[in-house]
Amino acid sequence: MKNPLNNGCRPKINYLTVFFIGTTIILLVLLIMNQSKSTKTEEYTSDMILSKIVYLQELSLVKYNYTGVISYKDYYKILNINVPLTEKSFLIKYGGYVKAGVDFSRIKVDVDNRSVHVSVPKAKILDTVIDENSVKVYDESQNAFNPIKITDYNEALKKEKNTMIDDALKQGILKEANEQAKLAISALLQGLGFEKIEVTEEIALPELH
């Protein structure tokens, strides 16, 4: 019976990439300029507003990029005891990312004349990727009693994805994505000329069992 372990240090350089900030600033400036040039007040329905908001989804995504090293070690075990001379190990260097955002298809819009209320669902992790082209394997052991298999690499990368998600959650990626979505929507609505704008997070009701 084998028990793969994903041990060792994972030196990780982590930095935040936000697709949103520069684009939103430009969008906000252009919308306000267009608003100031026009004296005509256009009436919008909830469906019209929602159709415009949906286009902001890609702009409001938050992406954390990662590079790291995975240290993998495994022994052949009998009765949960390491068998001597059966160690196998390797190092994997990789690059990847965790992406989070809001599901804009679940946004609800309520328009009342020049006032608008938008209910935004909570952000969630949308994608966790380790770029296969970035993966480099080093220091592979050569043990005839316990050879390295493709499944060992896959298991190590799978566990590392969970580590990436945990790290992103601790750093506040979901909060960041929620704020980005609210800011993008508020900028759009301001540019459309609404006088009272309210953007709130959807209240998640507890599941009944």
Image (cartoon, rainbow, N blue to C red):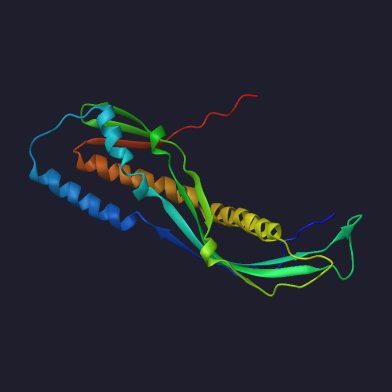
19 on left or right of 116: right
Which quadrant, please, contains the N terminus?
bottom right
Q: Residue at x 77, y 68 (%)?
A: 88
71 on left or right of 38: right
Please name whichever residue, 136 or 41, is drawn nearer the observer in this view of the structure: 136
Q: Residue furthest right?
A: 79
94 on left or right of 103: right
Q: Residue at x 61, y 24 (%)?
A: 208
Q: Residue at x 54, y 61 (%)?
A: 132
From this view, report whether residue 106 is shown above or below residue 22. above
**Where residue 116 appears, x then y in whole percent?**
28, 32
Please name whichever residue, 150 or 122, is drawn nearer the observer in this view of the structure: 150
Q: Residue at x 34, y 54 (%)?
A: 20
**Where residue 182 appears, x then y in whole percent?**
36, 43
Q: Residue furthest bottom?
A: 139
Q: Quadrant location of residue 90? A: bottom right
Please name whichever residue, 93 or 11, is drawn nearer the observer in this view of the structure: 93
Q: Quadrant location of residue 63? A: bottom left
From this view, report whether residue 77 is shown above or below residue 207. below
Q: Residue furthest front?
A: 144
From this view, report whether residue 206 is shown above or below residue 144. above
**Where residue 67 appears, x then y in whole percent?**
54, 66
**Where residue 161 appears, x then y in whole percent?**
60, 55
155 on left or right of 65: right
